[in-house]
Image (cartoon, rainbow, N blue to C red):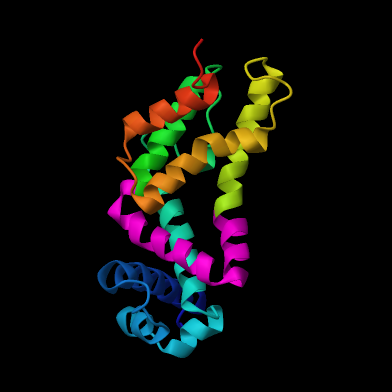
Amino acid sequence: MPPDSSRRSEKSRRAIYAAALTLVAEVGYPKTTIEAIAARAGVGKQTIYRWWSSKAEVLMEAFVDLGAQAAEAAGNGDWAEEDGIPDTGDLEADLKTVLRATVDELNDPRYEAPARALAAEGVANPAFAKEFVATLLLPSLELYVRRLRAAQDAGQVRADVDPYIARDLFVSPLAQRWLQGTGPLDHAFANRLVEYALYGIAPR
């Protein structure tokens, strides 16, 4: 029986994903090359160029797959992005659950190096930035918009609030602290963000 080409291709693809993620963590994104990824994965570099046009594309696909594999492996009731933002009827509790999970992911060494590399590439490469935003950021951000609209329908958020601006009140401070290291990135910070965004900072 001839070898199964689809199985062989999937094996090579997963080896390339693993190589890209490992190299970025070990030597950093600037020193990660297509040649190095191919050598680590045990494939020819033409195999990589047949599927991707740049190391940034390899890394982004590997990062998306990493998240999918982690969510599948967890299977323990923890929140996963694929589930959407929970709607228990308690908006504050639901948002805190999601932001705490996001903090855990941002602090996880498996995610941090590739996530920072992709963010940096997005700043330097406008064409890649559009793909990065469309593939990785917007689907996640849209979950907040949908949950906030549901809260508006339930009378928990004012009807005149723009859910896109409100969304950024939660996620943008988290991203800034992660990128710039301006303070601790922990559950307490996530909880306080939700409270400030929902209830404001003026005296009540």
Residue in the foreground of this view, choosing between 1 and 41:
41
Task: Choose top left, top right, bottom left or bottom right for residue 191.
Answer: top left
Residue in the foreground of this view, choosing between 77 and 164:
164
Residue 138 vertical position relative to residue 10 in the rendered view, above or below: above
Residue 177 vertical position relative to residue 190 in the rendered view, above or below: below
In percent of width and height, residue 201 lies at 49, 21
Q: Is residue 108 magenta?
A: yes
Q: Main secondary structure of the magenta part?
A: helix
Q: Which residues are magenta?
A: 107-136
Could you tell whether 46 is left or right of 108 in the image? Answer: right
Which residue is depicted at the point 54% across and 78% down? 52
Which residue is depicted at the point 55% across and 72% down? 125
In percent of width and height, residue 188 lies at 33, 29
Residue 201 vertical position relative to residue 53 in the rendered view, above or below: above
Q: Is residue 146 magenta?
A: no
Could you tell whether 63 is left or right of 151 in the image? Answer: left
Q: Is residue 78 visible?
A: no
Farthest residue, direction right:
160
Could you tell whether 157 is left or right of 65 in the image? Answer: right
Which residue is depicted at the point 51% across and 71% down? 124
Farthest residue, direction front:
203
Residue in the foreground of this view, choosing between 177 and 104:
177
Task: Choose top left, top right, bottom left or bottom right for residue 103.
Answer: top left
In percent of width and height, residue 184 lies at 30, 40
Q: How many marks?
A: 0
Which residue is depicted at the point 31% across and 73% down? 23
Q: Is residue 143 visible?
A: yes
Farthest residue, direction top:
204
